[in-house]
Amino acid sequence: MLLALAGLALTALAPTAAANGRNPGSVLIFPVHRSGPNAFSVITVTNTNLQPATPISLGGSTNLHYEYVNVNPGTSPFRPLNCVIFDRVEFLTPADTLSVLTSCHNAVAGTVEGYVVVTAEDPTQFQTPWAFDYLVGSEIVISASGIGYSVNALPFSANMAPMTPTDLDGDGKRDFDNTEYDAIPDYLMVDSFVAVATSQLTLLNLTGGDQDINTVLLSIWNDNEFPLSTTLAFNCWFDQPLSRVSPLFTQTFMSSVPNDPRELDINCDGVGELETGWIIIDSIDLSQPGGATLYDDGAFLGAITTGPGTNLVGGRLLWESVETQPNGQFFNR
């Protein structure tokens, strides 16, 4: 009963996806993919452009360049050995929608996971990203038990005339710098978490290479506005329980600090049974593996879910700051 309500709280304590004001973009980033026989994702991308230039032209159509970032696990769940990209290109006509099962579409043997970047490209040119702010999308992530959750893609608009190339500096990267594409938020927020083992955090690094280390500061407040903090160093991508991120997020610890004894009351008896809180996540250092600092603030994105392998469901994107971080990049490594 307690865990079931906690799972519902993970989604119920946030606004619905339709209320967050996201707009179509030229790049979509899906924060999680699972591609294997026992856990997989269904990724959907839709072209909302309804008007071809002529009935027989390519106008209104686009190529989609799918890049699956597949994590090669290391000894630490936050420090994978590397991230290897598998890519495919698909063609979408006006008003077209495409749903793919990642276990088939991401042709990598075995069970892999990571994140996915989908970029609009000029269908008349080879690997030429272009401004095509008509893409929307979402994904369903399904665990071995058959239980899943759904989250929207993170969209990024191009900052130039429609149907023109976006790689202005010719570096082969998608630069999220407010020049080629929208910049990435400076910090992210978890509006609410429940201190149970099924609360799970996903972050992906978008500054530097796949081995460069993004150190983030997690500033935490519990249900009694009691402040806590912890740091976490990760590279490339992770999707792990909050209790593994830090023991601060466990029911045992959260109930040991000053808290509101009435929250979260799920039996309507005036006594709180589950501890809750919220988080601000901000990058404070981006360094090479040897320790040399590249930036004092890196770009990253993320989501919070109930994780795989449970009978609970729930997932949502993190809230974003108005302030942006212009050093985010993505490229085919």
Image: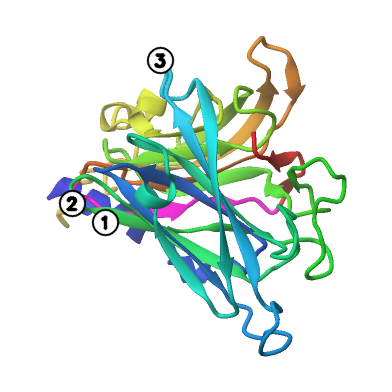
Q: Tell me if residue 230 can be seen.
A: yes
- Alpha carbon of mark 2 to alpha carbon of mark 1: how far? 6 Å
Residue 35 lies, in percent from the top left, at 36, 44
* Depth check, front residue: 69 or 180: 69
Q: Earlier in the sequence, mark 3 or mark 2?
A: 2
Q: Position of residue 150 (x, y in %)?
A: 37, 58
> Secondary structure beneath disc 2?
helix
Secondary structure of residue under mark 1: helix
Residue 144 appears left or right of 104: left
* 270 relative to 298 in the view: left or right: left
The circle on residue 8 is 1
Q: Which residue is mark 3?
A: 75
Q: Amino acid at mark 3?
A: Thr
| Residue 231 appears in view | no
Task: Look at mark 2 in the image and give the residue it sits on.
Answer: 4
In this rendering, the answer to whether 173 lies above or below 180 is: above
Write down the region rendered in magenta.
Answer: 311-322
Along the polypeptide, which appears first: circle 3 or circle 1? 1
